[in-house]
Image (cartoon, rainbow, N blue to C red):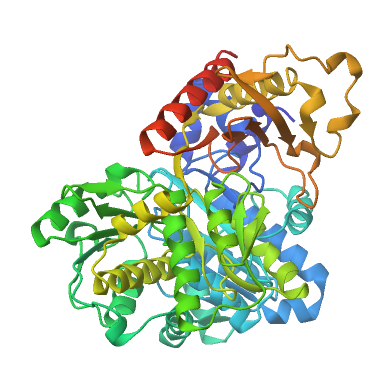
Amino acid sequence: MDYKERFDIWMKQIPAGDPLRPQLEALASDEAEMAERFSQEMVFGTAGLRGVTGVGTNCMNLYTVGRATRGIAEYIRQAGPEAMNKGVIIAHDPRHFSKEFSRLAACILARAGIRVYTFPDLRPTPELACLIRVKKTVSGINITASHNPPEYNGYKVYWEDGCQVSAQVADGMMHCMMDLDYFTDCDIDDSEYDEMIKDGRITLLGEAEDRLYLDMVRSLAIHEGDELDLSIPIVYTPLNGAGSIPFSRMMEERGFQNFHIVPEQKDPDPDFSTVGYPNPEDPKAFRLSEELGAKIGAELLMATDPDSDRFAIELMGDDGKYVPLNGNQTGYLLVNYILEGHRAAGTLPENGAMIKSIVTSSLSAEIAASYGVKMIEALTGFKNICGRIPFLEEHGYTYLFGYEESVGYAACPEIRDKDGISAGMLIAEAAAYYRKQGKTLFQVLSELGARYGYYAEDEPNLVLKGIPGAQRIRRMMDSVRGNLPMDRVAGAKGKDASAAACRDDSVWSSVAGIRVTKVIDYKDGYEDIPASNVLRFFLENGSWFAVRPSGTEPKIKFYFYSRQDTPQKAQEVNRKIKEAAMETILAVE
């Protein structure tokens, strides 16, 4: 079925008076936009469904959300009565239509005879992930677009292990979904929703569940009381998202006496009007935090994204100015603090293990090794990172921490997703601990460089929207793979290349004049890591870089890492490698 046929069906099915009807009618005279909205149907990416809100099969609306939920309901029904009785927990963030989408999902599941738990208002994503395991539900759904711009919404899906659904489960759900139309059972009736609460088909969660989550976060504390300087001035912003209440309660209960929330960003705002792009990974999101921090002399600025799973920081530097840290650098601090803290407390396990993504800096593995802790790798996304926790437990390891460079951190083995609240508690605790010793986090980061070598990290990306953008990203990846020095490629099928391709003069034999010693192509998997559209290049000077299309956004991502004996040298080497590699890739039109 092509996009015009899909459009015609929606024109026949969407009634007059539906808020989407004017958008639909406007597409009749805009074929390019019609194609954009109807050429594809939404499918599960790295974190479920995500897209711009509006009319169309490729957008987030009541019809696509309803269809997805009916597919999930059918998948659960096929699993049997026990799975249906375990039920599904549903949460949502402050975005436009999040509450409506969550209520629709609750009603559809309840109509299908599946037990439903939900909240009366917004909650952080990590709390949902936590409660799936606590309440032993079969699944969980969070209506959120995480850190995306305000025109986006999304639909994260979890399974009974508390992780976002694996590829196998997602495929099963998609199979059930693709057999369904968009227009059956997709209505919201507030009176029906209220009646379902009264008769027990939908159970509202609240303070008791909030307490369970915060107690689990609190259990991660390493140092307490007199070991900490709790007068340390700290600023936090939830970026108008779900983090304000739980983060404040956590910091108050830990005893922090000089904790401040950016007032303009304290309350939910679906337009994120104070920030625009609510991504704590972007230093521009800290503008108001820096203003407040300067007034109170804050040593540490912290931010979470709208659903509170991402977490980022800025530190006051030696010159009194705030320095934004990337996700790798914050990861260095957390890895080191957790390991150093446990060793000092005598609680470092014999078989400790941590997990990082394949595109995350190698420095954390060196830090872990210095404490006798194993660092293993996983594909990007916390369904992959936290999905490896059972493997560690089965092999006698104690899980200590998992993270990836895109400001995601998972410190608790029972919360199997990235968690900005617990990451914030640990960073605040670390700052208070080192302050008691007369040091700042900025100084600790410098000490790590002096001890292990100075790393430069750069993670640029190129946004390419729409169908033309997706096609260009595919051409870029195809071009890179078509010009590899195949005698240096490692991967499930890397050694099967023809001898004719094994030449030393290929485009990627060297980068910026530095010989490429190894390429890992994850297209067909590598060692115990499943298949993924990722390439990693290792250079003879110890630098490496990776390239991968995003699974949730219309962009292609790049990751560059270099280590030298000074920060300046590391930055210069990394810059040259980045410029040379990206020039070649971006030349593909």
* Residue depicted at 46% across the width and 63% down the height: 336
**Residue 18 percent location from the top left of the image:** 47, 47
Please tell me which residue lies in front, 286 or 81.
Answer: 286
* Residue depicted at 30% across the width and 69% down the height: 434
One can see residue 47 in this view: yes
Please tell me which residue lies in front, 262 or 206.
Answer: 262
Please tell me which residue lies in front, 264 or 425.
Answer: 425
Q: Point out the image quarter for the C terminus.
A: top right
Q: Position of 19 compared to 494: left or right?
A: left
Q: Position of 281 compared to 376: left or right?
A: left
**Residue 256 percent location from the top left of the image:** 24, 78
* Residue depicted at 27% across the width and 80% down the height: 252
**Residue at the extreme left:** 295
Please identify the quarter of the rendering in which residue 536 is found: top right
Question: As displayed, is residue 468 above or below residue 431?
Answer: above
Question: As displayed, is residue 176 above or below residue 281?
Answer: below
**Residue 48 percent location from the top left of the image:** 61, 52
One can see residue 253 in this view: no
Q: Point out the image quarter for the N terminus.
A: top right
* Residue depicted at 34% across the width and 78% down the height: 250
Q: Position of 349 compared to 148: left or right?
A: right
**Residue 565 percent location from the top left of the image:** 44, 39
Please tell me which residue lies in front, 486 or 51.
Answer: 486
Question: As displayed, is residue 475 above or below residue 347?
Answer: above
How many numbered circles are shown?
A: 0
